[in-house]
């Protein structure tokens, strides 16, 4: 399945702040928070973050057969997210938004088995990221 590095449909992140409005203050650039989801969604820094998420997903798809190659990278990435105040549970909202986007973009072509494969892939990525969490 081809992935677009521009982040695909923008509905991914519209959905994200609907699901979890508390994520908005975590996207802070130059010590400034956004006052509305719209402001955040249209900022170049946030759009760049969407691109970063899609690159990670793309790397996971590319390394599907040997995901352990990405373990160190993903655990470090997890640590960085803990440092900016993200909770492991919050990744669920990103996963749900991703599924929502895929369903919207692919319509009836998005079959149950493909959906399950995506859930499996995403939860593997999140599991690897959560290894970086320090208690
Ligand atoms: C960096 C927030 C989920 C991939 C960052 C940064 C913030 C952030 C504030 C640092 C600034 C920036 O580079 O934009 C969040 C929040 C998330 C989330 C609030 C929602 C729970 C994810 C997910 C992925 C991801 C699910 C990938 C699967 C990245 C990458 C970077 C990054 C690759 C750059 C790290 C680096 O500079 O080394 N994130 N993020 N993020 N995020 Fe996220």
Image (spheres, rainbow, N blue to C red):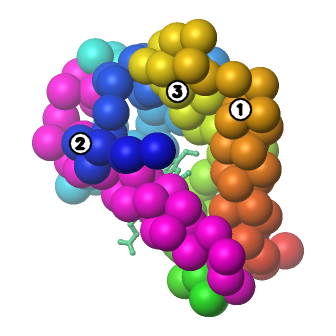
The numbered dot on residue 6 is 2
**Would you say residue 113 sits in the magenta stretch?**
no
Reply above or below: 45 against 115: below
Query: Secondary structure beneath disc 3?
Result: helix
Reply above or below: 59 against 89: below
Q: CA distance from mark 1 to mark 2?
A: 21 Å
Nearer to us in this view, 38 or 53: 53
| 1 vs 2, front mark | 1
What residue does disc 3 label?
102
**Would you say residue 42 sits in the magenta stretch?**
yes
Query: Secondary structure beneath disc 2?
Result: loop
Q: Which residues are magenta?
A: 39-68
Query: Secondary structure beneath disc 1?
Result: helix
- Residue 87: percent from the left, percent from the top? 70, 51
**Contact between labelled residues 2 and 1, with CB atoms less than 8 Å apart:** no
Nearer to us in this view, 118 or 72: 118
Q: CA distance from mark 1 to mark 3?
A: 9 Å
First in residue order: circle 3 vs circle 2: 2
The numbered dot on residue 115 is 1
Reply above or below: 129 against 32: below
* Residue 29 visible somewhere in the drawing: yes
- Residue 35: percent from the left, percent from the top? 32, 22
Judge: label 3 CB < 8 Å from ligand 1: no
Q: Residue at x 28, y 29 (%)?
A: 40
């Amino acid at each position: 399945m081809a992935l677009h590095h521009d982040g695909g449909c923008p509905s991914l992140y519209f959905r994200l702040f609907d699901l979890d409005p508390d994520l908005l203050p975590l996207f802070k650039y130059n010590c400034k928070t956004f006052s509305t989801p719209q402001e955040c969604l249209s900022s170049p820094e946030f759009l760049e973050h969407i691109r970063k998420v899609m690159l990670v997903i793309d790397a996971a798809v590319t390394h599907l057969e040997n995901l352990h190659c990405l373990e160190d990278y993903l655990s470090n990435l997890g640590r960085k997210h803990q440092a900016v105040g993200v909770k492991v549970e919050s990744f669920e909202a990103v996963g749900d938004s991703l599924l929502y986007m895929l369903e919207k973009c692919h319509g009836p072509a998005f079959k149950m088995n493909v959906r399950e494969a995506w859930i499996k892939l995403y939860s593997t990525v999140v599991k690897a990221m959560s290894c970086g969490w320090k208690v």
